[in-house]
Amino acid sequence: EPLTPPVKPQKLIDQLQHWLQDHGFAGVNIDLENLSAADTRLVPAFLARMSATLHKANLQVSFDLEVEGDVPDAGAVAKHVDFVVLMAYDQHGPSFSKPGPVGGLPWATTALDALIGAGVPTARIDRAVAG
């Protein structure tokens, strides 16, 4: 229940801020996967709270976005984070599809175009690849 307001998310964010500062990190990358549709809708507000707190401490926030599935709105996410990481892999895999590329160029390009179309500035997109 870390995304559910009001007390739990802020406690998590405050603890994270102190941990990041104590260990000398520049920021945090958030990777929330396999969320329910209800939780997906809570992500932008959670990131807004997190960024507001961490930015005051000069810490950066990035967020990983899956290409497919119940994923948060990319444009809404981008409004609150320093950059978005496009998870341009898992197009095919042994447990969920027929054989094929892990992240084929046409598939990844379509995903990147969708991010840009959602209003995410290109300078704030990182593309993650399988490796």
Image (cartoon, rainbow, N blue to C red):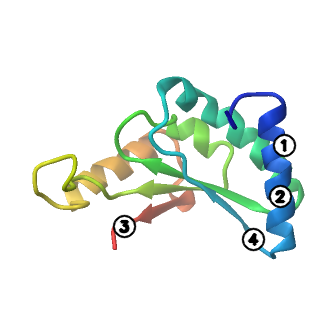
Residue at the location (23% across, 61% down)? 102
Q: Earlier in the sequence, mark 4 or mark 2?
A: 2
Q: Earlier in the sequence, mark 4 or mark 1?
A: 1
Location of residue 5 with respect to 31 vertically, above or below: above
Do callouts 4 and 1 mark residues in contact (Cβ within 8 Å)?
A: no
Q: Which residue is mark 2?
A: 17
Q: Position of residue 43 (x, y in %)?
A: 61, 36
Q: Which residue is mark 3?
A: 129
* SS of the residue under disc 2: helix
Q: Earlier in the sequence, mark 1 or mark 3?
A: 1
Residue at the location (29% across, 55% down)? 90
Q: Judge by depth and name the residue closer to the eye, 31 or 113.
A: 31
Q: Position of residue 72 (x, y in %)?
A: 51, 36
* SS of the residue under disc 3: loop
Q: Earlier in the sequence, mark 4 or mark 3?
A: 4
Q: Which residue is mark 1?
A: 11
Q: Which residue is mark 4?
A: 26
Q: Quadrant of the N terminus?
A: top right
* SS of the residue under disc 4: loop
Residue at the location (16% across, 47% down)? 97
Q: Disc 1 versus disc 2: distance between alpha carbons? A: 10 Å
Q: Position of residue 26 (x, y in %)?
A: 75, 71
Which amino acid is tagged 3? Val
Q: Quadrant of residue 61?
A: bottom right
Q: Disc 4 versus disc 3: distance between alpha carbons? A: 22 Å
Do callouts 2 and 3 mark residues in contact (Cβ within 8 Å)?
A: no
Q: Residues within 10 Å of mark 4 (few under 14, many from 20)?
A: few
Q: Position of residue 109 (x, y in %)?
A: 29, 55
Q: Disc 4 versus disc 2: distance between alpha carbons? A: 10 Å
